[in-house]
Image (tube, rainbow, N blue to C red):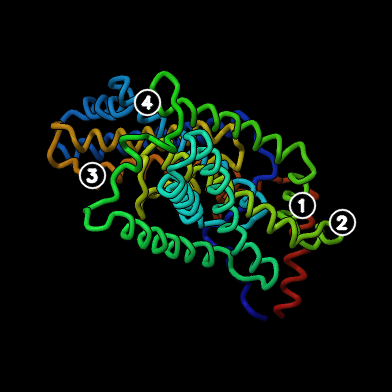
Amino acid sequence: MTEAKKDPFVRIAKRNDISLKKKIEIKVVCVLGAVLLSIIFIWIVSGKNPLPAVNYIFQGTFKNSIKIWSALQEMVILLAIALALTPAFKMRFWNIGAQGQILMGALMTAVCMIYFKNLPNLAIIAISLVLSILGGALYGFIPAFFKAKFNTNETLFTLMMNYIAVLIVTIFTKMWRGAASSLGQINFTTKLGWLYTIANNQVIVPFICVSVLVISTYVYLKKTKHGYEIEVVGESVNTARYTGINVKKVIMRTVALSGALCGAIGFFYVAGIDHTLTEATSGSYGFTAIIVAWLSHLNPFLMIFFSFLVVFLNKGGKNLSDSSYSPNLNEYSCEFIVFLIIISILLSEFFTSYRLIFRNSKPKDSSPLHHSLTSNLLTKEDKING
């Protein structure tokens, strides 16, 4: 008879029920642990009192009105991209192509601003918005079509399409700028195609739009037939087919919607924020927004908090590295501090859903029925192994 196999030293078990109080305790412990580790890290690297460093981190966002509006602008962009990705992610279509879809929308806007100069300003803005939405939708539709028809890997497909978008934008910007070192701001003197501002502030209009988008996304996913179909397809494709849902249509429609929203973000980049186009127009926000979406469990309202948190940490870290606090705290040191905070939040999410069971720990359920069932299972296992 073979020896009974030892249980692993530690195993992971899903928590079936956890109280709100326990969830809060886990999250607080994880975040406070990350803050403590960050303070210790700053103290070790700088050799100074770490408390002034915390002040520099807060000043990165709240030092003056300029920094506050700058942080709000970045938060709006990050939140908008996270919201755009949400329908596809809800369907378990891993759209990693937000950067490319934004670039396509931005390119369409730049085309309108450069080639439609004979039209009125309002017409240029309206056409730019429509074409940017269509451009982003088409760029999202392509991988969705291949996923629906040929079951291709959407993660790789959308990721590769980012690089194609970068090359397309690079070709156009080199053609437009000619011998100049950069494209510069499009229509700088005439401001044709530039989005209207409120109180001479270019953040307010995008802020209003993304506020409407938060509510619209929630209503669309929770209160409409399309939202129901997205959720069913995400839970089980077979169940969706059994209930009569056209899965291929839902996939193509939903990812095209995500691409359309990303294209609209590209419009705001060129017409409302930068007024120019480069291959780095969307930066790394397309990937950072994925973190925001998952930290919030695809909840549009929670995305507001996590978008702010990510921007706050990034700006605070950059301000700390640019300060005269310590030459040893460079950009990479500050990125490590941001990493500690983000990983602590991810760990808190893990421990609210799962628990670790060690080999010598007592079972949670010590009732006679539990022991009887366990004994029966062990006896059957011994018979099979014997």
**Residue kind at label 1, given as amino acid type:** Val
Asked where in the image residue 95 lies, by quadrant, the reply is bottom right
Residue placed under numbered mark 4 in the picture: 69
- Distance from Cα at disc 4 to Cα at disc 2: 48 Å
Label 4 CA crowd tier, 10 Å (few <14, some 14–19, many 20+): some
Q: Position of residue 244 (x, y in %)?
A: 87, 58
User: Which of pointers 4 and 2 lies earlier in the amino acid sequence?
Assistant: 4
Up/down of 84 relative to 8, above or below: above
Q: For marks 4 and 3, give the CA distance.
A: 23 Å
- Answer left or right for 334 relative to 275: left
Residue 232 numbered mark, or none: 1
Residue beneath label 3, please? 331
Decide which of tag 1 and tag 3 comes sooner along the chain. Answer: 1
Quarter occupied by the C terminus: bottom right
Amino acid type at mark 4: Trp
Amino acid type at mark 2: Thr
Report the label total.
4
